[in-house]
Image (cartoon, rainbow, N blue to C red):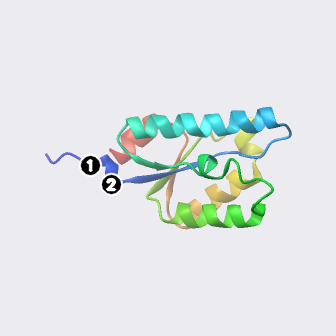
Amino acid sequence: MEKINRRKKVVYIIGPFRAKTDHERIKNIRAAEAMADTLWEMGFTVICCHMNTKNMEGFIPDDDILEGDIEIMMRCDFCVTSFPFKHEKMVNSVGSQNEIKHAREHNKSVYDNCKMVKLREG
């Protein structure tokens, strides 16, 4: 049986970014970063836009960042959320819900845990 090269699969991290306080925003970024770290360790190539744009607030309009994030997501093989689907932060994140909707409309798989990624993606 041929071994799957996970590194060829590119994963996009979906998760809340904006928050009412800087402390909560940093926690959101860290959650996305932790998921990205786990997926890299599993052998996948990972795009974590939270890390890419964490210092751009106020310099680049939010709409431009969100549009760019969707463009990056569309070039990935599948998506993983930084929190479980039903977690309050995911449910209340308009940006995350938009990304999930967009991914599913374009037949991209969206997972909320690494066990499902391992089961479905190799």
The residue lying furthest to the right in this view is 20
Q: Residue at x 78, y 32 (%)?
A: 23
The residue lying furthest to the left in this view is 1
Q: Residue at x 64, y 58 (%)?
A: 99
Q: Amino acid at mark 2?
A: Lys
Q: CA distance from mark 1 to mark 2?
A: 6 Å
Whether residue 87 is visible here, answered yes or no, is no
Give residue 88's position: percent from left, percent from top.
Answer: 75, 37
Give residue 97's position: percent from left, percent from top.
Answer: 70, 53
Q: Residue at x 33, y 49 (%)?
A: 7
Q: Using the image, tell me which numbered label, if any, was put on residue 5.
A: 1
Q: Are marks 1 and 2 in contact (CB under 8 Å)?
A: yes
Q: Between 33 and 101, which is closer to the camera in this rendering?
A: 33
Residue that mark 2 sits on: 8
Classify mark 2: helix, strand or loop.
helix
Instruction: Name which quarter of the figure residue 26 lies in.
Output: top right
